């Protein structure tokens, strides 16, 4: 890998997936997972040693590793201070860009966790990475941290009074913006993880040994999964989806004063993609284009 210099990289480290871009229009997506590798080469992939750590694989390269772990989805707020979270960030950046200097890394956090921005800014430094017995460096000069829904706002700038509902894997972030200023924000735990747990509970009661977990259920919603020689489509679980959608919308109505006071209501994130056909229809309701990557594209524009 040759040394590169990048002016800006935007990165949205979600509970389920990490999205990143270095150009603002082409976005790469990686599962937010890592796995310790007892050997440098495991499962057709070379592991990475970061600043002398044990070897690990990250993102796509860890997807089918039985020891894969989700750093982000443990909902432990101290996760941002852990070596595992730092390694996940650097590992995915290295897998995407290799030997590189990044002048500005723009990151996003859920509304309820933006107070941990300083924990992320500590990653602005140089890392030594070993892969296949070869040494590389990855340097980050500075880090900017934004609330995740601000990315969607930056793609839909307006002086109108907005309500942005950003449903990701772990949380649903609800943000009230007027004239470009964040007035109020909330987070609930009714992200897509909640739906996957509902579906898994149903599958567990009917299909023993199905092999799914909270993470792979998200992939199965798109591609289905094989069980007993048959292809099972998760469209069969419409009742669970309806219950989850109702829980999300009810939580929004409990938090905001009245839905009619907003000139525009914007749905974004994986939640918006999953429920684009079931969300309420009204003149002031918008589902953003490419909702799963809208935030990271907005981050790049700052």
Image (tube, rainbow, N blue to C red):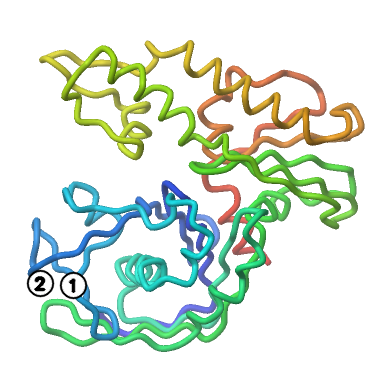
Label 1 close to label 2 by CB (< 8 Å): yes
Apparent side of residue 130 relative to residue 117 in the rendered image (left or right): left
Apparent side of residue 108 relative to residue 241 in the rendered image (left or right): right
Q: Residue at x 67, y 50 (%)?
A: 149
The answer to whether residue 22 is above or below residue 216 is below
- How far apart are the alpha carbons under marks 1 and 2? 6 Å
Q: Residue at x 56, y 83 (%)?
A: 142
Q: Residue at x 58, y 32 (%)?
A: 272
Q: Which residue is mark 1?
A: 55
N-term-proximal mark, 1 vs 2: 2
Please tell me in which quadrant of the rendered image residue 288 appears: top right
Q: Which residue is mark 2?
A: 40
Image quarter of the C terminus: bottom right
For disc 2, the neighbor class at 10 Å (few under 14, some 14 to 19, many from 20) is some
Viewer-side residue, 93 vs 237: 237
Q: Residue at x 53, y 65 (%)?
A: 10
Instruction: Return the x and y of residue 225 as percentages of the image width and height.
Output: 24, 24
Instruction: Look at the numbered disc 2 and give the secondary structure of its residue.
Output: loop
């Amino acid at each position: 890998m040759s040394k590169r210099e990048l002016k800006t990289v935007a990165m949205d480290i979600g509970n389920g997936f990490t999205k990143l871009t270095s150009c603002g229009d082409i976005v790469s997506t990686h599962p937010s997972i890592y796995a310790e590798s007892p050997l440098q080469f495991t499962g057709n992939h070379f592991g990475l040693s970061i600043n002398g750590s044990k070897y690990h694989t990250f993102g796509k390269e860890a997807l089918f590793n039985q020891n894969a772990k989700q750093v982000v989805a443990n909902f432990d707020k101290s996760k941002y201070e852990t070596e595992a979270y730092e390694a996940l960030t650097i590992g995915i950046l290295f897998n995407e860009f290799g030997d590189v200097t990044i002048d500005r890394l723009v990151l996003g956090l859920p509304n309820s966790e933006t107070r941990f921005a300083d924990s992320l800014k500590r990653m602005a430094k140089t890392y030594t990475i070993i892969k296949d017995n070869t040494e590389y460096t990855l340097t980050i000069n500075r880090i900017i941290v934004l609330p995740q829904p601000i990315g969607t706002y930056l793609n839909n700038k307006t002086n109108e009074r907005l309500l942005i509902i950003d449903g990701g894997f772990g949380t649903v972030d609800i943000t009230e913006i007027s004239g470009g200023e964040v007035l109020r924000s909330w987070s609930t735990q009714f992200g897509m993880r909640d739906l996957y747990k509902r579906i898994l509970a149903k599958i567990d009661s009917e299909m023993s040994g199905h092999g799914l977990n909270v993470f792979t259920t998200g992939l199965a919603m798109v591609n289905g999964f094989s069980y007993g020689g048959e292809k099972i489509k998760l469209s069969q679980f419409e009742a669970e989806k309806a219950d989850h959608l109702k829980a999300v919308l009810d939580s929004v109505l409990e938090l905001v004063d009245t839905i009619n006071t907003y000139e525009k209501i914007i749905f974004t994130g994986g939640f918006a993609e999953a429920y684009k056909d079931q969300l309420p229809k009204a003149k002031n309701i918008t589902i953003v284009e490419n909702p799963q990557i809208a935030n990271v594209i907005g981050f790049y524009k700052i």
